[in-house]
Amino acid sequence: MSILKRELRQGFKPFVLWASGFAFLVLGGMVKFSGMEAMEGAGMGQMLSQFPKPVLAMFGMAEARIETLGGFYAVLQFYAMILLACYAVHLGTASVLRESMDKTYEFLFTKPCGRMHILSMKLLGGLLFLGAMCLLNGLFSWIAPGLYGIRNTIQREILLFSAAVFWVGLLFFSVGAWISVVMKRGERAVQVAYGTVLLSYGLSVAFDMDERLECLRPVTLFRYFRAGELLEGHLHAGYLISLLLFSALFLALAYLGFRRKDLNAA
C-alpha cells in the first residue's frame, strides 16, 4: 500500500495540470458554442460544408454538425480523446520508467515485496488517475452547458462519450506500459509510445477522408467509437470487447517482460 501511496503522491501534480487542460478544452469549447448559437450556428454549418474534406477530417469535423450541441460536443470529445490518449501514455510509461530513469528502483526493492507487486501497485495508481480524469471530463461536460445558459440536451451522449474516451485511453495506457518494458532506453520508449498516439490520429484523418478506407477502422483507435454512432446512442460492443482484450493482452505482456527487465538501464 505504501508503494501505491507513493505513486499517487508523485502523480498528483501532473494530474492537476492535465485536468486543467481538460477543463480549458470543455469549458472553453462551450464558450465558443454559446457564441455560435447567438450568431446563428446554422450559418457556421453551411460555411464548414464548403471546406475540403481533408480539412474537416484533420479537425474531427467530418461526421459532426457543429451547429448542434451534440455535434459540437462530439468534436470537443474527439480532441478530449486525443488528449486523454496522451495522458494515458504518460501514465503507462511512468508506471514502468519513473524509478528506472531516476535510478531509485533500489529504494522500492527495500520493501518486502516482489517485482510483480511493485508493478501492480504502480499500474493501479495509473489506472486510478486515468479513471479520475475521465470522470472529470464527464463532470466538466455535464456542468459546462448550464454555465453559459445552454440547455443541456445531451446527457446520454455525455455518458457514452465519457465511456468511449475511457476505454480508448485504457488501451493507450496498456500500450505505453508494454513499450516501456520491451525497450531498453527510457527516452526512446516515451517517444515511441507518444508516436502511437500520432499514428492513430493520422489513421483517423485518413479514415475520415475516404469512405473506401472503412477497412482501416480495426486499426484506427480514435474511430472505434464513431461520433455519429454515439450521437445515436450506440456504443459499438464489438470494438469495446476488442479494446478490453487488447488492453488485457498488452498488460499481460508488460508483466511478463517486467520480470526480466534490467531496471537500472534507462
Image (spheres, helix red, strand yellow):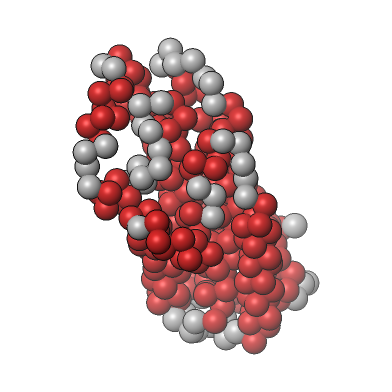
Residue furthest out toward the right: 112
Q: Residue at x 55, y 68 (%)?
A: 175
Answer with the quarter of the image where residue 105 lies.
bottom right
Residue 42, by quadrant, is top left
Q: Position of residue 3 (x, y in %)?
A: 68, 61
Q: Quadrant of residue 72?
A: top left
Q: Nearer the viewer, residue 117 or 149?
A: 149
Position of the N terminus by quadrant: bottom right
Q: Residue furthest front?
A: 212
Left/right placement of residue 258 relative to residue 197 reads right
Q: Position of residue 13 (x, y in %)?
A: 49, 47
Camera-side residue of 166 and 46: 46
Image height of 141 relative to 222, above or below: above
Q: Is residue 203 visible?
A: yes
Question: How many numbered marks have been drawn onto this rendered protein structure?
Answer: 0
Work out whether 202 lies above or below 84.
below
Give whichever of 51, 113 is nearer the camera.
51
Picture coordinates of residue 147, whole percent (x, y): 45, 17
**Who's the residue at 40% across and 77% down the image?**
188
Q: Position of residue 80 (x, y in %)?
A: 45, 44
Looking at the image, residue 78 sits to the left or right of residue 38; the answer is right
Above or below 12: residue 160:
above
The residue positioned 46% from the left and 65% from the top of the image is 216
Whether residue 251 is visible to the viewer of this picture, yes or no, is: no
